[in-house]
């Protein structure tokens, strides 16, 4: 998106509503990677024109998505719930970024909110495997009816998916919201100040307290077999991966990492995600620890 188009979207609320609704439909047609796109538009409007304008864009797009769900034979409330999931967190983070100007603070608050969400779900709804197993089995049966070759029951994936779904939902909510916020900030920089987002993103970190909490939760997840601990570790692993990517971009900007290696990192995230996520999370932890200690000593 060039700077003129970004400026045009923020200056035309009707166009922003339509674009948000259109982008929100993409994941429904198999483009799962596009989940973070719709939230970026109201977040951009919030950054440029304020929270009220962003909220109006999100509300209008939610109505369009609810109508679209109804037209394709699904209950309209499903569209509203979906809109709340993909538009709500980026909108809130956009308002926070507009006030604070800190991507680091936004990441920290998003991770804390994700952790609270995970603990609340475990505390109120009990064993995730018992809660989710009927839904996952229904999904498996639907997949078989559609002729898909995967058999979740025989592969033992029903129990695994049911046991980890709360953690994945919280982790994906945080990651999608942050990706939408990053895209919105990049669009804003393109329209107002070139290079602004890159400079801010390269400084993203979790801080000492959350960094230690991440290390403890990941280590405890490796040594124990507790769903709550595993879900928290999954969330922190995702957050440290973002910090690792920020470190990679900073190394590239400082001339310590060739641009080809940066492209290779993103390619490996697609082709060998588990290995690359672990590597980036490790890099993110070390980088976060060193920079957070330095910041604490200089304070």
Image (cartoon, rainbow, N blue to C red):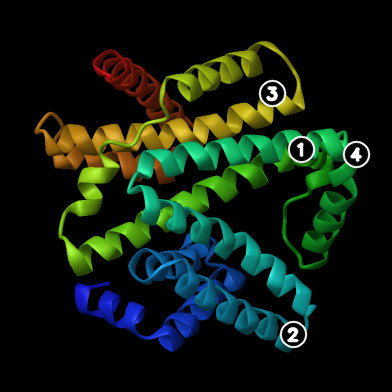
Left of 246 or right of it: where is 224? right
Q: Which of marks 1 and 4 is nearer the N terminus?
A: 1
- Pointer 3: residues within 10 angstroms few (<14), some, or many (20+)? many
Locate residue 141, reporting x and y percent: 85, 58
Q: Can you tell which of label 2 and label 1 is closer to the viewer?
A: 1
Residue bearing the label numbered 2: 70
* Distance from the alpha carbon under mark 4 to that under mark 3: 17 Å
Locate residue 38, reporting x and y percent: 49, 69
Residue drawn at x 50%, y 53% is 177
Circles 2 and 4, Cβ within 8 Å, touching? The answer is no
* Distance from the alpha carbon under mark 2 to that under mark 1: 31 Å
Q: Earlier in the sequence, mark 4 or mark 3?
A: 4
* Residue 14, quarter of the rendered image: bottom left
* Distance from the alpha carbon under mark 1 to that under mark 4: 16 Å
Residue bearing the label numbered 4: 130
Q: Which of 287 and 158 is in front in this view?
A: 287
The count of marks equals: 4
- Pointer 2: residues within 10 angstroms few (<14), some, or many (20+)? some
User: Quick check: can you spot residue 262?
Assistant: yes
Residue bearing the label numbered 3: 229
**Image quadrant occupied by the N terminus:** bottom left
Q: Which of marks 2 and 3 is nearer the N terminus?
A: 2
Residue drawn at x 77%, y 68% is 146
Circles 4 and 3, Cβ within 8 Å, touching? The answer is no
């Amino acid at each position: 998106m060039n700077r003129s188009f970004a400026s045009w979207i923020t200056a035309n609320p009707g166009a922003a509503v339509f674009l948000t609704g259109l982008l929100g439909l993409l994941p429904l047609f198999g483009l799962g990677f596009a989940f973070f796109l719709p939230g970026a538009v109201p977040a951009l409007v919030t950054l440029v024109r304020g929270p009220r304008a962003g909220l109006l864009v999100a509300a209008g797009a939610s109505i369009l998505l609810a109508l679209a769900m109804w037209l394709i034979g699904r209950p309209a409330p499903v569209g509203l719930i979906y809109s709340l999931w993909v538009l709500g967190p980026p909108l809130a983070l956009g308002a926070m970024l507009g006030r604070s100007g800190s991507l680091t603070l936004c990441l920290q608050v998003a991770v804390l909110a994700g952790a609270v969400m995970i603990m609340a779900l475990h505390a109120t709804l009990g064993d995730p495997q018992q809660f989710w197993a009927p839904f996952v089995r229904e999904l498996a049966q639907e997949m078989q009816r559609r002729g898909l070759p995967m058999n979740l029951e025989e592969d033992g994936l029903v129990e695994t998916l049911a046991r980890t779904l709360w953690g994945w939902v919280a982790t994906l909510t945080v990651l999608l919201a942050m990706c939408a916020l990053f895209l919105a900030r990049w669009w804003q920089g393109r329209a107002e100040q070139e290079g602004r987002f890159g400079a801010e993103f390269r400084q993203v970190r979790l801080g000492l307290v959350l960094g230690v909490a991440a290390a403890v939760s990941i280590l405890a997840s490796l040594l124990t077999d507790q769903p709550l601990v595993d879900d928290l570790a999954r969330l922190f692993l995702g957050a440290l991966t973002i910090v690792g990517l920020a470190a990679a971009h900073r190394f590239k900007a400082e001339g310590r990492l060739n641009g080809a290696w940066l492209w290779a990192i993103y390619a490996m995230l697609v082709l060998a995600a588990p290995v690359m996520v672990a590597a980036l999370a490790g890099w993110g932890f070390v980088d976060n620890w060193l920079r957070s200690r330095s910041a604490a000593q200089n304070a």
